[in-house]
Image: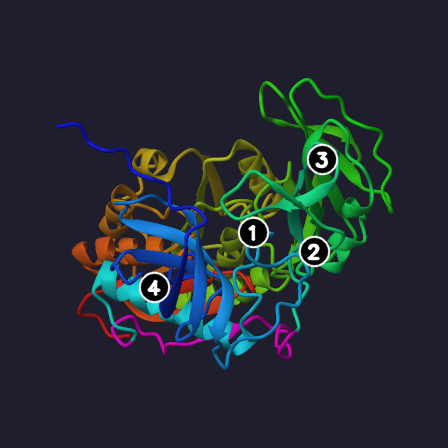
């Protein structure tokens, strides 16, 4: 018997009651036939008309946008950004939610992920159930903090700067990004044409006047003469090797945090919220409570932020090992911490390098893995070292919950969890969990 091909439902509209928030910047609803809809631009409890953007008959779920609101939530506000909305810029998920509601939505997602993936209630995780605003980010309803110090602009076929639409390669051309930090906006990326360029990353360092743009040419394209509104360093992504090459100016920016200046090269990783680095260092150090003479590990150490803070606290009798896979970040970390001879930085994947170090025990461990999380192998290796305390910094609550389940299987449980809204008006949230051996006091 020949099976009929599934029919696309894109463009189909359904009137639905919106259910709970889900991880990823959308809410869950169901059609009258019971098919699941993941609906963007909606809020829990609303009644909306949802237009399907992805999916077909028989699919496990459909994606949709709320194109008309029939009964609005009290938490709904008019989106401040003119480029936000169904089919528009995909960067900000919660433009239509009041600031306090955004944090409640993120808290609900964290709680759901902890329960579903780790079997933990907020109380079990040592969490008060709230998402804390970043310092200085308390804004009135309808306002948006300008917090993003690194913005990746996409360039359309006509050389105009914009941002990607949700789950699309299409470019929403913009004249201003509301969440871009002032140092990014003053570069004037949106105001000029970028012929033969595929993307422009604009970087405004915190605590210095360093500004940088990283240009990715289209295949076969040449770099244009770069004339921006202020002097900047310019880097280029190689068409063949995808490495970053200096065009003019410094090949790095200087960031300021935790009482030190940090060199961050080649568009390398640094927290994008200007308050994030200091806030996270303070939270991690309070969680770990390092003592003079401790041995500590900073895994996925980047340019050495937590390793430097630990080294200051463990003193001359202590030792800190950092592990990072990115070659340029390792070079920067070694440069940034060159005055601290008790710090050693190794390059490679954590699960490959850690067994080769010969380290069999450690007092403290901090992990700040990529969005995918640390994973079972790395968790087992960390737990085998028997640390007194572990601090896990996570930008994805699902990855955090999965790894907390792995830690539980290896004898460690969370005793404290804090969540920070370091990415306002988006669905992203930063968490810091402190773990101890099961059965030990907090």
**Nearer the N terminus, badge 2 or badge 3?**
2
Q: Is residue 25 visible?
A: no
Q: Is residue 152 magenta?
A: no
Q: Which residue is mark 3?
A: 251
**Nearer the N terminus, badge 2 or badge 1?**
1
Q: CA distance from mark 4 to mark 2?
A: 30 Å
Dot 4: what SS? Answer: strand
Question: Which one is in front in this view, the residue at disc 4 or the one at disc 2?
Answer: 4
Q: Is residue 155 above or below residue 434?
A: above
Q: Residues within 10 Å of mark 4 (few under 14, many from 20)?
A: many
Numbered mark located on residue 29 in the image: 4
Where is residue 66 drawn, in percent x and y?
48, 62
Q: Are marks 1 and 4 in contact (CB under 8 Å)?
A: no
Q: Which residue is mark 2?
A: 177
Question: Which one is in front in this view, the residue at disc 2 or the one at disc 3?
Answer: 2
Residue at 43% over, 74% down = 46
Q: Which residues are magenta?
A: 123-142
The N terminus lies in quadrant: top left
**Nearer the N terminus, badge 1 or badge 4?**
4
Q: Looking at the image, which residue sits at the far left?
A: 1
Q: Is residue 376 above or below residue 279?
A: above
Residue at 66% over, 68% down = 80
Q: Nearer the viewer, residue 163 or 125?
A: 163
Numbered mark located on residue 250 in the image: none
Q: Residues within 10 Å of mark 2 (few under 14, many from 20)?
A: many
Query: How many numbered callouts?
Result: 4
Where is residue 207 drawn, in percent x and y?
72, 58
Numbered mark located on residue 87 in the image: 1
Residue at 64% over, 36% down = 266
Where is residue 62 drawn, in percent x and y?
35, 51
In the visual, does 193 lie left or right of 145?
right
């Amino acid at each position: 018997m020949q099976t009929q091909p599934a029919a696309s439902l894109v463009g189909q509209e359904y009137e639905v009651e919106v259910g709970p928030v889900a991880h990823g910047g959308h809410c869950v609803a169901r059609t009258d036939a019971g098919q699941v809809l993941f609906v963007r631009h909606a809020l829990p409890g609303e009644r909306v008309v949802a237009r399907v953007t992805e999916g077909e008959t028989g699919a496990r779920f459909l994606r949709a946008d709320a194109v008309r609101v029939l009964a609005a939530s009290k938490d709904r506000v008019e989106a401040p950004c003119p480029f936000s909305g169904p089919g528009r810029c995909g960067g900000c998920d919660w433009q239509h939610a009041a600031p306090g509601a955004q944090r409640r939505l993120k808290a609900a997602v964290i709680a759901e992920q902890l329960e579903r993936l780790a079997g933990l209630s907020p109380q079990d995780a040592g969490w008060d159930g709230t998402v804390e605003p970043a310092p200085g980010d308390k804004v009135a309803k309808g306002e948006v903090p300008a917090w993003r110090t690194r913005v990746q602009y996409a360039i359309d076929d006509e050389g105009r700067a914009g941002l990607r639409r949700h789950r699309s390669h299409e470019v929403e051309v913009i004249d201003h990004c509301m969440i871009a930090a002032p140092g990014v906006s003053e570069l004037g990326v949106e105001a000029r044409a970028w012929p033969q360029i595929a993307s422009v990353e604009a970087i405004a360092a915190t605590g210095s006047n360093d500004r940088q743009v990283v240009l990715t040419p289209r295949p076969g394209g040449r770099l244009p003469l770069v004339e921006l509104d202020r002097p900047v360093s310019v880097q280029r992504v190689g068409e063949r090797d995808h490495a970053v090459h200096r065009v003019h100016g410094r090949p790095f920016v200087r960031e300021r945090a935790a009482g030190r200046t940090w060199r961050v090269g080649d568009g390398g990783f640094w927290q994008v919220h200007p308050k994030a680095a200091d806030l996270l260092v303070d939270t991690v150090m309070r969680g770990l409570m390092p003592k003079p003479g401790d041995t500590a590990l900073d895994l996925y150490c980047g340019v050495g932020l937590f390793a430097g803070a630990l080294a200051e606290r463990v003193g001359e009798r202590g030792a800190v090992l950092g592990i990072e896979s990115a070659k340029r970040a390792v070079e920067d970390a070694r440069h940034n911490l060159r005055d601290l001879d008790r710090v050693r930085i190794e390059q490679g994947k954590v699960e490959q390098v850690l067994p080769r170090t010969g380290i069999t025990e450690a007092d403290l461990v901090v992990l700040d893995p990529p969005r995918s999380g640390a994973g079972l192998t790395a968790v087992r290796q960390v737990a085998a070292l028997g640390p007194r305390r572990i601090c896990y910094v996570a930008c994805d609550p699902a990855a955090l919950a999965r790894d907390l389940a792995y830690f539980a299987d290896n004898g460690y449980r969370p005793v404290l969890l804090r969540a920070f809204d370091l990415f306002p008006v988006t669905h992203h949230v930063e968490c810091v969990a402190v773990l101890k051996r099961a059965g030990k006091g907090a």
